[in-house]
Image: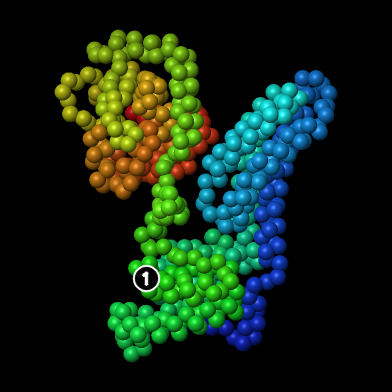
Amino acid sequence: MRHERFREDGNANLASSEARAVWNALLPRRGRAALRLAIAGGAAFAELAAVALTGLACEVIYHLVSYERQPDLGPSLAVGLLLGLFVVLPNAARGEYSIENYLARAPHLRRTTNLWLAAWAVVLVVGFLSKTTGEHSRAAALATFLAGLPVLVVTRLATVSLVRRLISPRSDSARRIHLIGYEDDVASFYATHDTAALGLRVIGVSILRDAPQGVPQGALKGSDPEARRAQLAEDLDLSVSVVRFLRPDDVFVLVPWAEVGDLEACVDAFLRVPVALHLRPGRVMDRFSDVRLGRVGLLTGINVGRAPLSPLEIAAKRTFDVVVASLALVALSPLLALIALLIRLDSRGPSLFRQKRYGFNQEAFWVFKFRSMRAESGAAFRQATRDDDRITRIGRILRRTNLDELPQLLNVIRGDMSLVGPRPHAVAHDRSFERRIALYARRHNVRPGITGWAQVNGLRGETLTDADMQRRVEHDLFYIDNWSLWFDLRILVMTVVARSAFRNAY
């Protein structure tokens, strides 16, 4: 068995004069737990203060503008602190303020938005039950609700940025880990993980011998079962002794799960040591960014993919879609009528055009658009290109301004589409790219949208190569994995004002 100790410069051959400094760096220092707790407590206090101060500021501004006098800040401070506690306590309970969570690429915006909405719901219920809602200004409360989320998000992002800048493998607060496994698996771990970026410090590695003495290296591990078990027991006894001495925070067992006997032996050996023990899943798990242990009834499994949206998120998104689409149809009805008239005057054919597309769960539906091309009966599908001679004069204006998509508000109200989501492609495109691009069909796990994250980033128009479509799919999957109502609002605003949303529109 081979053991390795690491320092930041990666040099394992140290002069004796450096030995004491190395061991001092490897062994745990006093006060590490207090430092980690201080960082988490500081982050929680920052969010509590941000919420409370936002509420006070909104109350003061409202009274100065409306009554030209300063209000009694006691009730406002109480409400702000209560609201802040309903934000901070759930975050603390689920480990949001841990250094590892700040260093991970976690969906902070989505989780913060959901928690803010839930905290407000609880505060309103508490106010209703205690009959104290009449003591507070509704205008100030609305201002706090609208301003509080951006302030909370900015506070979270600032804290994340600060932690990522300050924490390094040299920091006392970095989590100290020890690795154990076969040489190939340890090499694979280093190839796929930047431990420094994750705030982890590898203080030691125990590399198991993969063949008994006298058997060529690389031979089958089961070539001599008795010799193999004896060798593994010897390796594990030595490794446990090293771990007891170094006292890491966590031990990662990198032995492949297919090696059931070896894996169980490692688990049995390290359960006797006071450290957190982790089993490294097989390499197939590396393709999934969010792997967790899940239970369905009494059945336990590794959850590599959750439903895109929870029932509550689906209801919130659908309500938002119906309300906004209905209001938009009423407000834009004169414009819609004018566009329909101009299309009829410009060229022969109907004002509206419909085409079959795949929607949620790959179910086919008819998508509506304003007709922007000359009507061709029985013509085979052909994607629009730059300077396409089929596009009419009015159609060219409609396509460049995205106005040809407005009839899809009807699809939103019917439930075929959403305001925001992956854009639905023609059926011929779907069938072709689904076979050539990994996870392309995952776009159909949510309703398609009139606009989307790919479109507002300029990823639209003709797809000349698979790479063009791959970039669209990556943006669509990012939207699915990071959905929030705030994200939808951001995309809708970008659809109207961002120059990139009109790029490649022809």
Q: Position of residue 160 (x, y in %)?
A: 61, 51
In the image as oriented, which residue stretches furthest toward the left? 378
Camera-side residue: 329 or 278?
278
Give me the residue at 43% from left, 12% from top. Answer: 333
Position of the N terminus by quadrant: bottom left
Give me the residue at 54% from left, 74% from top. Answer: 272
The answer to whether 470 appears left or right of 486 in the picture is left
Classify residue 219 by image quadrant: bottom left
Q: Is residue 182 above or below residue 417?
A: below
The answer to whether 130 appears left or right of 396 in the picture is right
Position of the C terminus by quadrant: top left
Q: Position of residue 50 (x, y in %)?
A: 70, 41
Camera-side residue: 196 or 56?
56
Q: Secondary structure at mark 1?
A: helix
Classify residue 133 by image quadrant: top right
Q: How is the image coloured?
A: rainbow
Circle count:
1
Give me the residue at 23% from left, 41% from top. Answer: 432
Give me the residue at 25% from left, 33% from top. Answer: 427
Q: Is residue 258 above or below residue 417?
A: below
Residue type (three-letter) at the residue carrying disc 1: Val
Q: Position of residue 336 (x, y in %)?
A: 39, 14
In the image as oriented, which residue stretches furthest toward the bottom? 214
Circle 1 residues within 10 Å: few <14, some 14–19, many ≥20: few
Question: Is residue 329 in view?
Answer: yes
Q: Position of residue 392 (x, y in %)?
A: 28, 19
Camera-side residue: 203 or 114?
114
Label 1: which residue? 260
Q: Is residue 201 above or below residue 239?
A: above
The answer to whether 220 appears left or right of 477 in the picture is left
Classify residue 52 by image quadrant: top right
Question: Is residue 141 in view?
Answer: no
